[in-house]
Each structure stands twice: as C-alpha cells, then as structure tokens.
Image: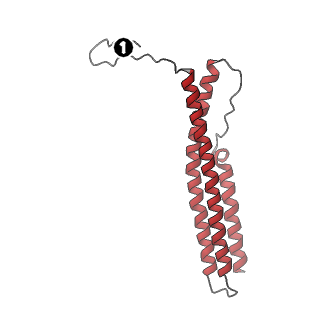
C-alpha cells in the first residue's frame, strides 16, 4: 500500500487490497454458523412458547367452572395470549438478526462467485416482509386463533 498525502489537511489515499480467499471462506463459514445457531435458538423459542402456552391453557381449562360468572379460566387464556405475543416479538427480533447474517452470507457468496467466474445464480428471496416473516406470523396466528376459539367455547 502506498500512502501519498498531497497537501496538508487532505486525507491520504488508501488503496484497497482484495481480501484473501482463505479469509473470505472463513468469514462465509462464520456467517453460516451464526445463521445455524440462530435457527437453533428460534426452534428453542418456539418450544418454550408451546410449553408455556400449553401450561396456561391447561390451567385455564382446569380452573374453568360450569358457572359463567367465574372468570379465572378466562384470565389464564388472556395470560396465554400475552405469552403468545411476547414470544412472537422475541422471535421477530431473532429472525431480524438472522436475516442480517443471511444477507452477509449472500454478499460473501457473491464475492467468491465473481472471483471464480461461476455462472451459478444466487437466488435472493425475502424481499417482502411476508416472505421474510411469513412462517413466524403463521405459527403465532394459528396459536392465537386457537386460544380465541377456546375462549369463545368456554364462554358459551
């Protein structure tokens, strides 16, 4: 690298050297490991969500009496809906981080493919929020809908 400041006060020009292939491959592996790690975290989050929602739903069914004036069973359903919303937000945050790492992985793959003149196409999906977060939205919508149906059944 050759730094040549021309005048005082001007920033020296820094020529960028290409990143070595070994470093690119290591960065790609690190990003892919992060994506896989976040997949595992999301799977665990969904497991905890199902466990807690099932427990509160069981408590609500156990505590619901035949009289319609007692709302102890309904309160557990409301807690289950709240738990669903909390886990939905947590999963959206983790998914956002994961998608950032997926984009980094795609960028690194593009650099590697361009260096070796690969003709393979890198498919970039997930341009709309529904494509990026669709399964998460569907998963928690089904749980919420099921809880609301149970609330309606118990109130009738």
Residue 105 at what x, y percent from top left? 60, 33
Residue 144 at what x, y percent from top left? 66, 64
Instruction: Name the residue nearer the viewer: 83 or 141.
Output: 83
Q: Quadrant of residue 12?
A: top left
Q: Which residue bears the numbered disc 1?
A: 3
**Residue in the image at 64% along x and 39% along y:** 127
The mark tally for this picture is: 1
Q: Is residue 102 visible?
A: no
* Quadrant in the picture for the C terminus: bottom right
Q: Taking 114 as reference, is 83 above or below it?
A: below
Q: Taking 88 as reference, is 149 above or below it?
A: below
**Residue in the image at 59% along x and 30% along y:** 107
**Residue in the image at 61% along x and 18% along y:** 115
Q: Taking 14 as reference, is 154 above or below it?
A: below
SS assignment at label 1: loop
Residue 99 at what x, y percent from top left? 59, 42
* Quadrant in the picture for the N terminus: top left
Instruction: Name the residue nearer the viewer: 71 or 94.
Output: 94
Q: Is residue 148 visible?
A: yes
Name the residue at the left extreme: 8
Q: Quadrant of residue 55?
A: bottom right
Q: Residues within 10 Å of mark 1 (few under 14, many from 20)?
A: few
Q: Name the colouring of the figure.
A: secondary structure
Residue 6 at what x, y percent from top left? 31, 11
**Residue in the image at 46% along x and 18% along y:** 16
Relative to 1, is 74 on the left or the right?
Answer: right
């Amino acid at each position: 690298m050759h730094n040549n400041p021309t005048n005082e006060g001007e920033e020296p020009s820094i020529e960028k050297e290409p990143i070595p292939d070994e470093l690119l491959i290591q960065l790609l592996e690190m990003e892919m490991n992060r994506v896989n790690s976040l997949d595992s975290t999301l799977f665990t989050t969904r497991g905890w969500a199902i466990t807690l929602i099932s427990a509160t739903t069981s408590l609500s069914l156990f505590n619901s009496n035949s009289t319609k004036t007692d709302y102890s069973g309904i309160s557990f359903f409301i807690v289950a809906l709240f738990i669903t919303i909390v886990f939905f937000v947590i999963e959206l945050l983790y998914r956002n981080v994961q998608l950032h790492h997926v984009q980094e992985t795609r960028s690194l793959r593009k650099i590697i493919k361009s260096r070796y003149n690969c003709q393979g196409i890198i498919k970039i999906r997930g341009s709309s929020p529904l494509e990026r977060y669709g399964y998460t939205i569907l998963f928690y919508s089904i749980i919420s809908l099921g809880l609301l149906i149970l609330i309606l059944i118990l109130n009738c």
